[in-house]
Image (cartoon, grey):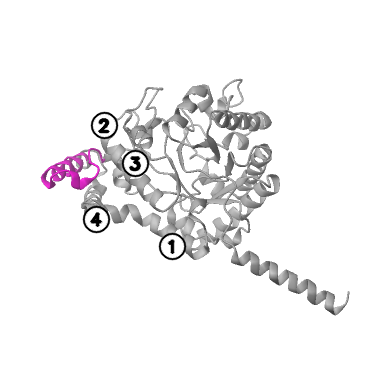
Amino acid sequence: MTLLGHLHKGWIAAMAVLALSACPALSATFSVKRGVNLDVWTTWPQEAQWGEPGVLSPYPEWRKFLKAGDLEALAAAGFDFVRMPVDPAPWLSQTSAGLGDELYASVRESARMINAAGLKVVVDLHSMPAGGGRSIGTRELMDDQAAFDRYVEVVRGMARTLAQEDPAKVALEVMNEPTMACEGADADIWSGRLKRLFAAARASATRLTLVLSGSCWSNAEGLAALDPADFPDDNLMWTFHSYDPFLLTHQGATWAGDFIQYVTGLPYPLHAVPRAELDAVVGRIKAVIDEKAPWSRRSGMKAYLDELIAGIDTKEKLEAAMEKPFATIDAWARRHGVASENILLGEFGMIRQEYQNPHVVPAAERAAYLRDMIGHAERHGYAWSIWGFGGAFGIVQEFEGRPAEPDVLDVVRGLPR
């Protein structure tokens, strides 16, 4: 080729690069606004049973209880999508290893059922903690390289399963809440692993929007540690979770650490009640700590409780605490040119009732919290999905299929459309 030809081709390439750099960032194919998380497990069958007929089928487990009308009711309430948690453990267990193709097909059927009800769906590969008769969970995937290698193949298989679905109606989230530190060496390790998950999914599903999160249980700091330039693809959504302030959103949760299980009765917001009333509630919580907590931990727990209360006991301090993760993500998005419509607040919520704990957080307070969080997300232009449909955080059902109070759903119904 002549020198002139080389120069001509170089000029065309340079103009193409300039044209692309002058264009705004492209949006993901999958576009959503308001969603709710479906349940992961309700009956929690032991892993030893997973190979038995009918134990895992249909999959995910909500298919055993919810019908088309239940999904259509979500669309009528104002949701435009659901986040569908799918536990990957059955694909990683020897007990159910022979069911892999059947389970993939059942997930695809579930996504189609959701679409038929007028809702889009994020298929969320939602690893759960091990224990309680389960041999593999998120921690094992993070700590065991061979287990993570097998998980990469599950992601590849799920992407292949969904590859021919309508990319405007179905998206794939490659991992929920990786349990690694927010920054430092752990964040770097997670970035490398996320690249592998991204590559495996994209190789199998070229049109599907992929949903990616940072480390540190998918919180804002974990996402802010990622560099989107490491994932050269316009068809992505970025997700983070926020349950701030944790002291209020997880009251009584026995699985959320050894401190929060003793905390019940705090109002939302704290400043909604007279200070004397708040002090009385705090005093009752401290009495429970003195009665039930390990002796050596009691004074530290009570001091920590006072510290947390002091950080959110006025309107201004509470607003700052709830806005902090959004501000973190907003700064990250501006720095990297990520459009707000490509950001998803994938989980947020307030506990209704810990299982078998008599304390129920008042419905009006839960509705107020959800209304405030939705306001933060929508002011920033982010999509959101509430945790969750049923169970401890249920906004539609509580336990055993019993209906939850309608207050939170009324918040969603009242949003402008």
How far, Cα to Cα, is label 4 from label 2?
28 Å
Q: Quadrant of the N terminus?
A: bottom right
Instruction: Identify the amino acid type marked 2.
Output: His
How far, Cα to Cα, is label 4 from label 1?
21 Å
Q: Nearer the viewer, residue 151 or 33?
A: 33
Is 274 inside the magenta-drawn segment?
Answer: yes
Please report whichever mark, 4 or 2, sits nearer to the chain's N-terminal start: 4
Nearer the observer: mark 2 or 1; the answer is: 1
Instruction: Identify the amino acid type marked 3.
Output: Leu
Nearer the observer: mark 2 or 3; the answer is: 3
| Horizontal relation, residue 43 to residue 172: left or right | left
Q: Nearer the viewer, residue 362 or 186?
A: 362
Q: Nearer the viewer, residue 296 or 164?
A: 164
Q: Residue furthest left?
A: 276
Assign a secondary structure to mark 1.
helix
Please report whichever mark, 4 or 3, sits nearer to the chain's N-terminal start: 4
Reading the image, the residue beneath label 3 is 370
**The disc label shown at residue 316, or none:** 4
How far, Cα to Cα, is label 3 from label 1?
23 Å
As drawn, 95 above or below 369? above
- Locate residue 333, reporting x and y percent: 48, 60
Residue extent of the magenta highlight: 263-288
- Locate residue 290, reporting x and y percent: 20, 42
Instruction: Identify the amino acid type marked 4.
Output: Glu
Please report whichever mark, 2 or 3, sits nearer to the chain's N-terminal start: 2
Reading the image, the residue beneath label 2 is 359
Q: Nearer the viewer, residue 204 or 373?
A: 373
Q: Do the numbered discs 4 and 2 sit on residues whose CB atoms are within 8 Å?
A: no
How far, Cα to Cα, is label 4 from label 3?
18 Å
Q: Alpha-carbon neighbours of circle 3 within 10 Å: few (<14), some, or many (≥20)?
A: many
